């Protein structure tokens, strides 16, 4: 599995690579939270069930990342670990472990305003799954 930050003007982009789709969704979620805060200081204090729906893999991954961002924006929740329990065309269900952001203890990096559709892509190549995501910061 791999996460690579990509250059993009005024936004932050990532490319994620994993052996399978559950790994891709898990890693993309971790990358989102890693852009917001230093994950090394996040403890596994809380568990949160999260799900999303979408018509194809791209729409589903986009909806998933938007849901994770909503959990941060509404509850201050930062996920450090993500276990995808169910992933099928149209639906993803997972369990996130982490804790709420505490600016006294955690190193905040940047705010993500949204998950853009610009350049958003999910594809399979050489038996591995890839995603490209641009975040509006």
Image (cartoon, rainbow, N blue to C red):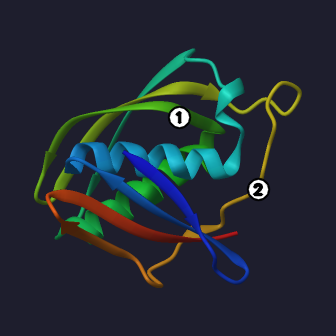
| Camera-side residue of 69 and 137 | 137
Whole-percent x, y for residue 46 in the image:
52, 19
Q: Which residue is mark 1?
A: 79
State whether residue 66 is above or below residue 83: below
Q: Which residue sits furthest left?
A: 89
Crowd tier of the residue under label 1, counting other residues whose Cα lies within 10 Å: few below 14, some 14–19, many 20 or above: many
Instruction: Say which residue appears at 63% left-offset and 76% top-offset.
Output: 7
Whole-percent x, y for residue 81 in the image:
46, 29
Query: Is 76 situated left or right of 67 in this image?
Result: right
Query: Is 38 situated left or right of 4 in this image?
Result: right
Instruction: Say which residue appears at 60% left-offset and 36% top-offset.
Output: 78
- In this rendering, does residue 92 appear at all? no
Query: Is 6 situated left or right of 53 in this image?
Result: right
Disc ID at residue 34 = none
Quarter of the N terminus within the rendering:
top left
Q: Secondary structure at mark 1?
A: strand
Whole-percent x, y for residue 56 in the image:
17, 70
Whole-percent x, y for residue 91 in the image:
18, 52
Crowd tier of the residue under label 2, counting other residues whose Cα lies within 10 Å: few below 14, some 14–19, many 20 or above: few
Mark 1–mark 2 distance (CA, rounded to whole Å): 15 Å
Q: Which residue sits furthest right?
A: 104
Instruction: Say which residue appears at 24% left-offset and 44% top-offset.
Output: 22
Q: Which residue is mark 2?
A: 110
State whether residue 44 is above or below residue 112: above
Q: Earlier in the sequence, mark 1 or mark 2?
A: 1
* Residue 15: quadrant of the picture: bottom left
Q: Secondary structure at mark 2?
A: loop
Quarter of the C terminus within the rendering:
bottom right
- Do the numbered discs 1 and 2 sit on residues whose CB atoms are within 8 Å? no
Q: Which residue sits furthest top?
A: 45
- In this rendering, does residue 18 appear at all? yes
């Amino acid at each position: 599995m791999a996460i690579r930050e990509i250059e993009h003007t005024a936004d932050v982009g990532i490319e994620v690579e994993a052996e399978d789709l559950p790994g891709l969704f898990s890693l993309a979620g971790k990358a989102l939270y890693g852009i917001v805060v230093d994950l090394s200081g996040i403890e596994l204090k809380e568990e949160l069930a999260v799900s999303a729906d979408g018509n194809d893999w791209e729409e589903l991954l986009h909806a998933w990342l938007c849901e994770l961002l909503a959990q941060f924006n509404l509850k201050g929740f930062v996920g450090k670990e993500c276990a995808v329990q169910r992933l099928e065309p149209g639906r993803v269900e997972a369990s996130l472990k982490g804790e709420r952001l505490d600016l006294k203890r955690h190193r905040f990096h940047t705010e993500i305003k949204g998950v853009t559709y610009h350049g958003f892509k999910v594809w399979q190549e050489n038996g591995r799954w890839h995603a490209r995501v641009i975040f509006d910061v």
